[in-house]
Amino acid sequence: MSDKIKFEMEFVIQASPQLLYQYISTPSGLSEWYADNVNSRSEKFTFIWDGAEENAKMLKRKSDEFVKFAWEENEDDSFFEMRIIVDEITKDVSLFITDFAEEDELDEAKMLWENQVSDLKQVLGSK
């Protein structure tokens, strides 16, 4: 097992939890910002970037709250999770990302999420 490092990132997103959930949990939503194309058959999702396919299994989900995936080729317990958090006082909506990366790929992984969430905000019309 490789020693991947767990990291977490939080992004404030100006969208309703219900709308945001559609973009993080459905093939059509994910293909708008996360990958070039996404297909699914029950809990198996195929993500396509530049013609290369990566398969992931949706481990868990809770409507309007979170989705949790694991890449099929992983030989460890790593996963990536996108969780929607609503601040009780301000009602601000945040997308909380949990992911794992090799130590020497940590900065790159964080930058990739920043770029992808920036695309998501653009699709949603969020600042």
Image (spheres, helix red, strand yellow):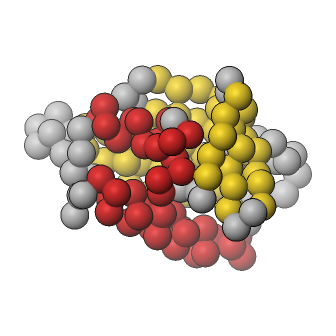
Q: Is residue 66 above or below residue 111?
A: above
The answer to whether residue 40 shows anywhere in this view is yes
Q: Residue at x 31, y 37 (%)?
A: 19
Horizontal side of 65 relative to 45 (left or right) equals left
Residue 59 picture location, percent across and down: 66, 29
Q: Residue at x 60, y 59 (%)?
A: 36
Q: Residue furthest left?
A: 90
The answer to whether residue 76 shows anywhere in this view is no
Q: Is residue 14 above or below residue 102?
A: above
Q: Who is closer to the viewer here, 20 or 105?
A: 20
Q: Residue at x 88, y 51 (%)?
A: 1
Q: Quadrant of residue 63?
A: top left
Horizontal side of 113 relative to 46 (left or right) equals left
Horizontal side of 44 relative to 15 (left or right) equals right
Q: Quadrant of residue 50?
A: bottom right
Q: Is residue 29 above or below residue 49?
A: above
Residue 81 picture location, percent across and down: 55, 42
Residue 126 picture location, percent across and down: 24, 58
Q: Who is closer to the viewer here, 75 or 116?
A: 116
Q: Who is closer to the viewer here, 111 or 5?
A: 111
Horizontal side of 100 relative to 114 (left or right) equals right
Q: Residue at x 47, y 57 (%)?
A: 33
Looking at the rendered structure, the number of numbered marks drawn on it comes to 0
Residue 28 picture location, percent across and down: 51, 42
Question: Which quarter of the figure is the C terminus placed in?
Answer: bottom left
